[in-house]
Image (cartoon, rainbow, N blue to C red):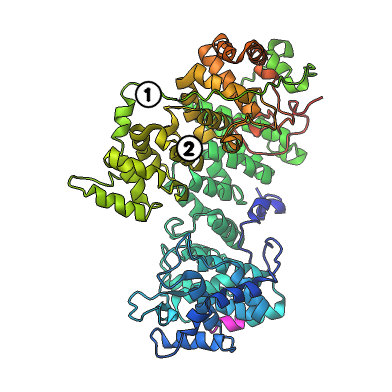
Amino acid sequence: MDEPPAEDALVIPDTWRRVLHPRRGGVPGPPIEIDARAGAVLREHAARKRAELGRVRPGTGGDPEIVAAVRDHLDGRPCPLGAAAVAYVLFSGTAGPPGPHEGRPPRWLADAWVSEHGVPFAAAACAEACALETAANRSADTRTNPASAIARATAFSSRDDGFLQLAARMRAILAAADEHDYQEAVARLAGHRRTEPQRVIVSFLVPTRQDWTDECRVVTEPRSPYAWMLWCSFGDARQAGRMRGWPLDGNGALSLDVLATAAEGIGARLVPVLLRALNAHPHPGPDRRVLLEVLSAMPSDEALAALIERRGETLALEALTAAMDRYPVRALRLLADTAAAEQASRRTAKDTQLSDLLADLLTWHLRAHPEPAAAERHRPAVARVLDAETRAEPAAPGDLPRVLAEPPWTREREKRGDPRVIELDPPGERALVWAPGERESWARAASPSGRWYAGTGHDWPAAVKSCREEPAGYAIGHLIAEGPEDLVRPLLSEWHWHARDWEAADGVWMRAVVARHGFDALPAALHAARANPGGCGKPLLPYLDDEVAALMAGRLARLKSARPTAVAWFGRHGAAAARALIPYALAPASKPPPRPDAAAAGRDVDRRDAERALRLIASDIGTEAVVDAARSYGRETAGAIAALLSTDPLDILPPRIPKLPAWADPARPPGTTGSSPPPPGSATPPSGRR
């Protein structure tokens, strides 16, 4: 049965427009505004390296064509290759190709070239820049000629190369350029297709030239790191058949920006490729989520049937309901046909569960999209499915718990007095509290990749001297964790731990630092926990300390990855942790307790965080034990804490009620967390205050 014309056309979701690589004549991307300052900024960069660029002279090594082009461009004769090579010197350095975090050429280079020389020149310079690399066998001294290390690339190292990101900006500029500039750019790019990388880049920049794309498709290896650019260049349905064998992984194509762009170019013909990739990525994860999201936008029976088949998977179910919203007539037909077929063949409990889910989806869909004509055509099949299902009667409000029948935010709030404010100093209690055998075990901890100073016979004094010369490197931390304690302990005051990028693996060997050096290691342990809360928080577990208590209260409330560590810390320190937090729980909302490190603690915790942590402790050791801990501050404080803990947690509401989460909306299909419009006539639970 034919679907309405609207259901046979791909509609690009609004969320895709932010990542789509626009093509001329296609779905427009975000508005293009050329950065008027980019040209001046580029000149400033060049001025700072004037002496280095001045050493680029013929006869000093390197590719003669590149050296001559640089000289022409610097001497006032604009040249795309020269502009590209100058940018390579400025932004990638001469020690090697640009890496993922350092030396990346900025995207605004395209804006600089456009503002200084126009769109056609900028397009040609981009085609040249993206096809340069550091020469593999350079013999010239780059201190004599910084351009001597540059060569024409024969392949790209990875999709993350900064110059390829520059190409994405240039493509967006070309897509929005006026017709004269665009045609002149296409004509000029024809002369910059000499190497295979250049041909791929040019096809990416101007995908309107499908003949150029076809040439690349013939010679490019499907798993090449720059094959993603061709996926973004396809715009002819004829190409779909030839690319069926192309994988999406291993070539940078398995990302939303690439797949959305490919979908815009070839539409539903992308479905077989997506299904093959789904089978290659059977486990939940970012790759599978992207594939399912793109599949849900495809206007085809094959795509929707694949989602219906996978409805038992959470990610697929969310994608299915999104597709049902986009293509309601197709969804009604396929849901009804599938439900009728499965009803007759189900044998196992799992079959029954999936069939029940399908019937629930069908019921919801009919309520959400009650189009009379479509519903009438499929009424017999729908009726057979729904009549066979047993539906539970809705519960009466009186049969529900009060929290469901009258959610707290819908009731008139009881007027309470202002929160009790008592300004207290934190107790300053400090101790190391170890579980049995824990300290000994931690003292032997090493990085997952092995001990830095493995084996015997180390010259420890020499290692200490070397680390003092480079106190921000990796070696000093491992030396503190592994070396003789009396020799390495002084290094703790010299260790530039604040300069590190803390990874989860560092949280392992940091346990040895804590076990061996105790409170001397606390500043480094606190910094590591703040830099990587989920991976480096556990070394703080033994510390009973006011600042650690404040940090853990904040993590408990606000950071899911660090919450298990915070819960374990409060479980370990109990009443002592409560004593440390009481000053925060009773402090003015905008003023942390006075303390030398109040600035750091104030970033970690506020009054509401401390209250939440005290309730957690009370649920573990009892309310009376927490009130007893408060008595060390006096009777008034103990009374205030008793009143705080007597409040029903369900009555503690934020000042602004959050938007109702999709999973709690009964108007959504079962098991989903997406956001579709509620079906007409559906009852939606209250989501705001009276």
Q: Which residues are magenta?
A: 186-193
Classify 352 as above or below 534.
above
Query: Is any atom of residue 613 visible in this view?
Result: yes
In the rendering, at what x and y percent does residue 216 appear?
47, 73
Find the distance from the CA under tag 2 to the CA under tag 1: 18 Å
Near-viewer residue (318 or 184): 184
Residue 256: quadrant of the picture? bottom right
Amino acid type, callout 2: Leu
534 relative to 613, above or below: below
Q: Residue at image x 70%, y 71%?
A: 36
**Measured from the top left, where is residue 368 in percent x and y?**
72, 35
Q: Residues within 10 Å of mark 2 (few under 14, many from 20)?
A: some
- The residue depicted at 72 percent of the width and 13 percent of the height is 396
Pick the front one: 656 or 416: 416
Report the disc number at residue 598.
none
Q: Which amino acid type corresponds to the residue marked 1 in the rendered image?
A: Trp
Image location of residue 23, percent across then percent down: 63, 67
Which residue occupies the extreme right position in the image? 690
| In the depicted structure, whether residue 121 falls above or below residue 545 | below
* Residue holding disc 2: 526
Q: Are marks 2 and 1 in contact (CB under 8 Å)?
A: no
- What secondary structure is marked by label 2? helix
Residue under numbered circle 1: 434
Query: Please, what secondary structure does the residue beneath circle 1 have?
Result: loop
